[in-house]
Image (cartoon, rainbow, N blue to C red):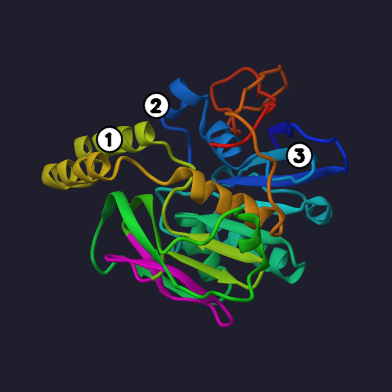
């Protein structure tokens, strides 16, 4: 483990410390490092503060792409896990991906909450017995409308939204792989024009989101430029992605982040307030870890959590 962040939600201060693990399956882009200090800060800013009633949180970071995983004896101490996106294929046979699948199966057997984002959504599906592969409709990049199944019942974590589940919500998408078949016992919660499984859940313990609720519009625009310059997507595809961003006015970030927080928090409403304030304190980091290129890993304190 290379970083630990304590997140204190403004509130009554009752309760203990809730502990979460962020499993990073990618390296930081130059843009993310320059603007946000790395994807770790992007995730904690988006999902931190899930605790209700002023509970404090601790977010530990593991760069799983580099072989950094939480120790088996520590797994029981975590309240939830978040698996990030990645440029790698979730159906690949690389050792760290196989190890990640094994970890997810262990966590599921322990009845731990696991939230998967993009690659994390796909690898969560794979680990629990579903099927994944190349997206049949090709790359999906931009801000897209995601449609929710109506009259969903039996999911307590939806009670943590603090609002009614909308019929649709705009979400940032950057992917060329997708879920083909959900695991046994899973439920599709949302779909889109290009992607049949945008969100799925396995009871209260696993939720996958194909898009990127943690991303901001500026991160998306930087990625569009990078994918276009690298030749991963055609210039016209990049232009179309930019058009969707302008036409939609950006993603419905407040909703998506409330959904993720509600899931991680087991359906209890998160603390509400103003935008988060980041307080950075020195904490030792390791080369190749969650703060690559930095001499120290920050501790982030969020004062107010509504976005």
Question: Looking at the image, is mark 3 or mark 2 nearer the viewer?
Answer: 3
Q: Position of residue 111 (x, y in %)?
A: 75, 67
Residues packed near mark 3 inside 10 Å, few (<14), some (14 to 19) or many (20 plus):
many
Q: Is residue 25 visible?
A: no
Q: Are marks 3 and 2 in contact (CB under 8 Å)?
A: no
Residues rendered magenta in the picture: 177-196
Q: Secondary structure at mark 3?
A: strand
Between 229 and 211, the one nearer to me in the picture: 211
Q: Position of residue 138 (x, y in %)?
A: 24, 61
Q: Position of residue 180 (x, y in %)?
A: 39, 74
Total numbered circles: 3
Residues packed near mark 2 inside 10 Å, few (<14), some (14 to 19) or many (20 plus):
some
Give the numbered dot on residue 57. Answer: 3
**Most extreme residue toward the bottom, as rendered?**
184
Q: Are marks 1 and 2 in contact (CB under 8 Å)?
A: yes
Q: CA distance from mark 1 to mark 3?
A: 34 Å
């Amino acid at each position: 483990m290379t970083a630990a962040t304590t997140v204190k939600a403004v509130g009554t201060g009752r309760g203990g410390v809730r502990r979460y693990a962020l499993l990073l399956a990618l390296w930081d882009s130059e843009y993310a490092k320059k603007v946000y200090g790395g994807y770790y800060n992007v995730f904690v800013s988006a999902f931190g503060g899930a605790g209700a009633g002023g509970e404090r949180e601790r977010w530990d970071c593991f760069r799983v792409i580099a072989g950094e995983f939480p120790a088996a004896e520590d797994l029981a101490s975590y309240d939830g896990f978040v698996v990030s996106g990645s440029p790698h294929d979730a159906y690949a046979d690389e050792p760290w991906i196989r190890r990640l699948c094994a970890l997810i199966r262990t966590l599921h057997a322990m009845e731990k909450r696991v939230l998967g984002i993009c690659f994390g959504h796909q690898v969560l599906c794979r680990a629990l017995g579903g099927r994944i592969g190349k997206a049949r409709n090709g790359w999906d990049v931009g801000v897209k409308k995601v449609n929710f199944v109506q009259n969903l019942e039996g999911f307590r974590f939806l009670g943590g939204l603090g609002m009614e589940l909308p019929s649709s919500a705009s979400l940032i998408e950057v992917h060329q792989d997708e879920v083909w078949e959900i695991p046994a016992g899973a439920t599709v919660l949302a779909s889109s024009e290009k992607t049949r499984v945008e969100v799925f859940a396995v009871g209260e313990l696993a939720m996958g989101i194909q898009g990127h609720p943690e991303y901001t519009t500026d991160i998306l625009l930087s990625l569009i430029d990078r994918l276009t310059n690298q030749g991963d997507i055609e210039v016209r595809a990049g232009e179309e992605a930019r058009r969707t961003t302008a036409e939609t006015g950006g993603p419905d970030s407040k909703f998506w982040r409330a959904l993720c927080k509600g899931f991680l928090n087991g359906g209890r409403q998160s603390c509400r307030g103003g935008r988060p304030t980041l307080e950075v304190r020195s904490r030792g980091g390791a080369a190749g870890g969650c703060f690559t290129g930095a001499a120290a890993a920050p501790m982030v304190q969020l004062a107010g959590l509504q976005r």
